[in-house]
Image (spheres, rainbow, N blue to C red):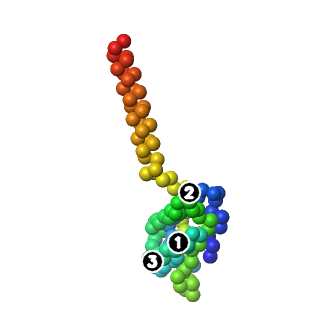
């Protein structure tokens, strides 16, 4: 079963949610489901529940265009279910960190210089 097709625009490289098996009335039951992403990532989840969150981030330069979930035992009445689906763009924090530190230091130096000039006046 394809859950999401054409996840979004050209920058969605992160997706996550609570993936778990349910029965016909919708109750969470023991079982396994498989999550497959358009980049070939496949993860089989066993005995998860409605608050078992798992997230995926695509390789740099890649995006997700679809996500599918399937029951490992489709002959049983086990339905793959997702709750709190999140789709977004992962921000590469380590690449931004030096720039943020430099900006913070520049603001700190400027503020320090302003305080020094105020004291002299």
The reply to whether discs 2 and 3 touch (Cβ–Cβ < 8 Å) is no
Q: What percent of the width, then of the height, locates residue 16?
A: 52, 63
Q: What percent of the width, then of the height, locates residue 83?
A: 54, 65
Identity of the residue drawn at 41% across and 36% down: 104
Res 66 label: none
Q: Which residue is mark 3?
A: 46
Position of the C terminus by quadrant: top left
Q: Residues within 10 Å of mark 1 (few under 14, many from 20)?
A: few
Q: What percent of the width, then of the height, locates residue 33?
A: 51, 77
Identity of the residue drawn at 52% across and 74% down: 42
**Front of the two marks 1 and 2:** 1
Q: Residues within 10 Å of mark 3 (few under 14, many from 20)?
A: some
Res 88 label: 2
Q: Is residue 110 left or right of residue 65?
A: left
Position of the N terminus by quadrant: bottom right
Up-down: is 97 above or below 12?
A: above
**Front of the two marks 3 and 1:** 1
As helix, strand or loop, the secondary structure at mark 2 comes to strand
As helix, strand or loop, the secondary structure at mark 1 comes to loop
Q: Is residue 7 left or right of residue 19?
A: right
Q: Which residue is mark 1?
A: 41
**Front of the two marks 2 and 3:** 2
Front one among 17 and 5 = 5
Which comes before the other along the chain, label 1 or label 2? 1
Q: What percent of the width, then of the height, locates residue 14?
A: 53, 60
Whole-angstrom CA distance, mark 3 to mark 1, is 17 Å
As helix, strand or loop, the secondary structure at mark 3 comes to strand
Whole-angstrom CA distance, mark 2 to mark 3, is 25 Å
Which comes before the other along the chain, label 3 or label 1? 1
């Amino acid at each position: 079963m394809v859950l999401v097709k054409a996840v979004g625009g050209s920058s969605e490289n992160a997706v996550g949610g609570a993936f778990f098996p349910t029965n016909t009335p919708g109750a969470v039951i023991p079982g396994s489901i498989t999550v497959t992403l358009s980049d070939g990532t496949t993860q089989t989840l066993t005995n998860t529940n409605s608050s078992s969150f798992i997230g995926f981030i695509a390789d740099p330069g890649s995006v997700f265009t679809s996500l599918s979930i399937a029951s490992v035992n489709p002959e049983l009445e086990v339905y793959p279910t997702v709750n709190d689906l999140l789709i977004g763009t992962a921000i590469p924090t380590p690449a931004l960190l030096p720039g943020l530190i430099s900006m913070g230091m520049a603001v700190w130096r400027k503020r320090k210089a302003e305080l020094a000039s105020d004291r002299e006046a």
